[in-house]
Image (cartoon, rainbow, N blue to C red):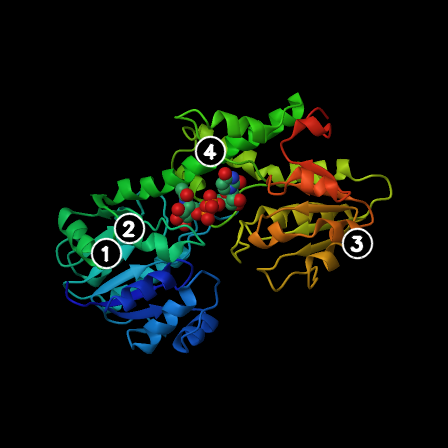
Amino acid sequence: MNKKKICIIGLGYIGLPTAAMFATHGHKIIGVDINKKIVDALNMGEITIEEPYLDKMVKAAVLSGNLRASYKTEEADVFIIAVGTPVNEDKTANMDAVIQAAESIVPVLREGNIVILESTSPPGTVNNLLCPILAKSGLDIGEQVLVAHCPERVLPGRILLELVENNKLIGGINQKSSEAVKELYSTFVKGEIYLTDATTAEMCKLMENTFRDVNIALANELALLCEDLGINAWDVIQLSNKHPRVNLHQPGPGVGGHCIAVDPWFIVEKSPELSRIIRLSRQINDEMPRYVYKKSRKIMGPGHKKITILGVTYKPNVDDIRESPILKLIEYFEDDGDIELAAYDPHVAELPYKASNLYEAASGSHLVILAVHHDQFKRVDFRKLASVMAAPNVLDTRNFWDENTVTASGLSYYLLGNGKTGIAITKE
Ligand code: SAJ
C-alpha cells in the first residue's frame, strides 16, 4: 500500500510499539503525547518503558527518520488514538483522554482521512462519543472520513511479537472504513484480519479480558476451597487440565494491570443488572490481596515483625505496577502499623522499601512472600536466604518454587491454595 503519514496519539504500552512497527514498515509516524519525558526521550531514540526489543526498534525507527514525537496532533492521512482509558472511583470508564485526543484531531481533520480508536472502550464509544466529536469538523463521517475501532490485544512482555502474529479485529463504522483500515494494518499484521462493526469489536475486546478475569476468579475460588477442604489446588488444576476441554487458570495474589482488572467494569457500567458473574469475578479477584495478607499473618508467629515481599509488578518479567495487587497487599501490612516491611523487585527501581538485592531485603525477616514470579526469582539460593532470615518461613503465592528444594534448605514452605499445610484461614 501507499506509505501513509500516521499520527499516533498516546505513546504508552500500545501507542509506542505500534508507532515503531508502522515506522519500520515505511510509514511516516508522528507520535503525540502530553508527557514531556516521553516526547523528549523518543526524539532522542530512547524509551521510558520496559518491553523486550522495543528499545532497538524505536532507535531504528527514529534513526530512519520515519518516527518523531510531538506534543501536538498534526495533519496526517491516518490518526490512531491509543490513549489510556482508566477506571474511575465509581468503576465507570474515564474517557477524558479519548475525548481530548478526538478533539485535538478535529482542527486538522481533512477529507480522505482515517481515524482509528485502539484504546479499550465501553461498547458504543465509537458511534456515540468519537464520531460526534469528529463531526464537529463539518466533514461527513463515514463518507469523507473513515472510522474504526481496532482493539489492541497484545500481551505485555510479548508486544512486538503479538502485534505481528495475533489475529486482528477491525470494527468499522461501515464497510468502507473496515476495508481501508484492514489495508493499513496488513502492512505488518501476519495473523488473520477479521472485519466487523465498531460496537461488536468493542465488546469482543472487553469479553476477551473478561473471559480471563472470570477464569482467574474461578481459580482463586478453587484455591480458597482447597485450603478449606485440605486439598492442594495446584494438583487439582494440573490433573483437571488433563481433560481435553478443561483449562483451569492459576490462582494468585490478585489480578492487576491496566487491562484485566479494569475492562470488565466497562461492561458492568453498561448493563449493571445483567453483569452478575462479571462483577462477582472482579470482587473475588480484588479480595485476593487481603486473603494473602491474612494467610501471612497466620503463618507469622508471636514476636514476628518483618516481612519481605518479592515482586511488586502486576505480573512477572515486566516493570509495570499499574493496578498491581501487590501494592494493595503492601497497604494491608502498612495499615497494621506493627509490621516492618521490605520489598524487592529487580524490574522496579523506585520502591519505597529499597534494597539492592533479595538477600538484603530478606535479612532479619520472619516471612518472605513470593508475590510475583519473575524469572530472576527462579535462581534464589535458598540456603543463603535461610541464613539471613530471622525465622525460616516462605509463602509462595504462585507455585513457583520447588517445595523439596526450599524445605531441604531448612525453610518452611507455604503455598497459596494448598490446604494440606494446615494453614487454612477460610474457616475463621
Ligand atoms: N493472572 C492470574 N492467573 C492466571 C493468569 C493471570 O492470576 O492464570 C494475573 C496476572 O498475575 C496479572 C493479571 O492476571 O496480575 C493479568 O495478566 P495477564 O498476563 O493475564 O494479562 P495482561 O493484563 O498482561 O494482558 C491482557 C491480555 N488479554 C488476554 O489474554 C485475554 C492481552 O492479550 C491484552 O491485550 C491485554 O490484557 C490488554 O491490553 O487488554
The dot on residue 150 is 2
Q: Nearer the viewer, residue 4 or 248?
A: 248
Look at the picture and state if 168 lies above or below 242: below
Q: How many marks?
A: 4
Instruction: Classify 10 Å Cα crowding around label 2: few (below 14), some (14-19), many (20 and above).
Output: many
**Earlier-in-chain disc, 3 versus 1:** 1
**Residue 47 falls left or right of residue 65:** right
Label 2 beta carbon less than 8 Å to ligand 1: no
Q: Secondary structure at mark 2?
A: loop
Residue on which the image places disc 1: 185
Q: Secondary structure at mark 1?
A: helix
Look at the picture and state if 158 lies above or below 60: above
Q: Whole-Å distance between the Cαs marked 1 and 4?
A: 31 Å
Q: Amino acid at mark 1?
A: Tyr
Q: Secondary structure at mark 4?
A: helix
Label 3 beta carbon less than 8 Å to ligand 1: no
Residue 78 x %, y %? 23, 63
Residue on which the image places disc 3: 388
Query: Mark 1 and 4 residues: CB-CB less than 8 Å, in contact?
Result: no
The dot on residue 385 is none
